[in-house]
Image: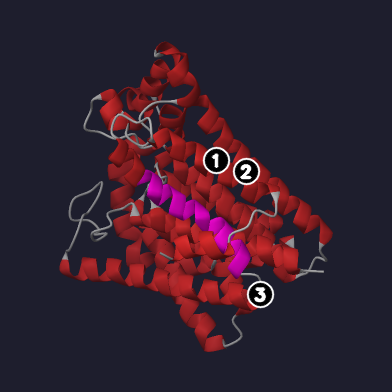
Amino acid sequence: MFVLYFIFRRFRIDNKVIGFLTNYLIYLGSLTLISSHYFTSLYQYIGVFISLMMLPIGYYYIHSVERLYQLSQVLLWVLAFITGSVLVSNMFGIGSSDYLEDSFYFGGGRVNITKTMVILLCSAPIYLYLEKAAHKRNIAIVIYVTSLAVCLIGIKRSVLLAIIVGIALFIVFGPTLKKSAKYAVIGSLLALISLPLYGDIFVERFEARSERVTIDQQTLDTESRYHEVYMVMDAIVNDGWKHRLIGSDLFNDRSYFNTQRMLHTDYMILLNGSGVIGIVAWLLFLAILLIWKVSLYKRIPKNNFVKILNAVFWMLLASQMLISISGTVYAITLRTYLYLMLGGILSVFKSYR
């Protein structure tokens, strides 16, 4: 309901990025009209529409440092709730224990909940910088470190990549290399100190997952996510120009391929459902978004906080692209948090004089 209110009362196209996003959403929406299963495509499209609309909503509403602080505070509470629910699941053995039975429980969200957690973790530098109360920062650090441990225990490849790349990007784009390295060392020390609490579980789960973490020919032959790339590319090449250009059955690939398993990679979902036009438009949107950020960043005076925001923006964008390998296009909560933060960071950049 709030998204509808925003569209009819507050939404305006005042820059190229918002304009491009609007046209992209219109294009995807038009494809639902020609889907063989209209309601299925429309239902999934609504989730995608809402999550992407968080970019302009974040941009128009989170236009000050104070509001960005409030957002980071809310995201910390959400992360605390998710982490707490995972810990409770392990106390009572509730939910799924993916990859290794009875090793570690992730509750009803399964191990995919770690994809949301790693996006929420990206807001940590913002909150820790803006929060002035020492006791609140200490509590937040405990929550962040515990959440990071849960993400590591999850052994989800895209999440592990997002963590590694995210830390590297913060070191490169953070306030100074010295300070960023200091934060990385402190985080590593905290992880090492807490290692006895989860080290054995991590090793057990890593060994159980190792055959799928290591990419070899056997993995390529048996892993469904790799197989779907070949399946989608074969359809693009052989199923005619219409399918090649605009795809078929947007967000309803199970119907198109007559299978029970949905596609699990965002890039393949968009390529199959919206064609070459759709996937190229999506990549162009991300590129234009980055160019907009770079242009705003160049115009403003640089201080430690501005550099932290720049680093977090890079972390979020990289995490989006990496986690998309394992599928996030239908994850409305994850993408809502991500695009709210991106929109807020861009708005704060624009507010600087």
Residue displayed at 51% across by 37% down: 27
The one of 273 and 106 positioned closer to us in this rendering: 273
Residue of label 3: 65
Tell me the element at label 2.
helix
The image shows residue 281 at horizontal and vertical percentages of: 57, 35
> Mark 1 = which residue?
24
Q: Which of marks 1 and 3 is nearer the N terminus?
A: 1
Q: Give the residue pinned by disc 2.
A: 20
Magenta highlight range: 44-61
Q: Nearer the viewer, residue 63 or 86?
A: 63
Amino acid tagged 3 = Val
> Left or right: 347 with respect to 212?
right
Examine the structure image and report whether residue 88 is included in the region drawn in magenta: no
Dot 1 surroundings within 10 Å: few (below 14), some, or many (20 or more)?
A: some
36 w.r.t. 162: above or below: above
Q: Which amino acid, mark 2?
A: Phe
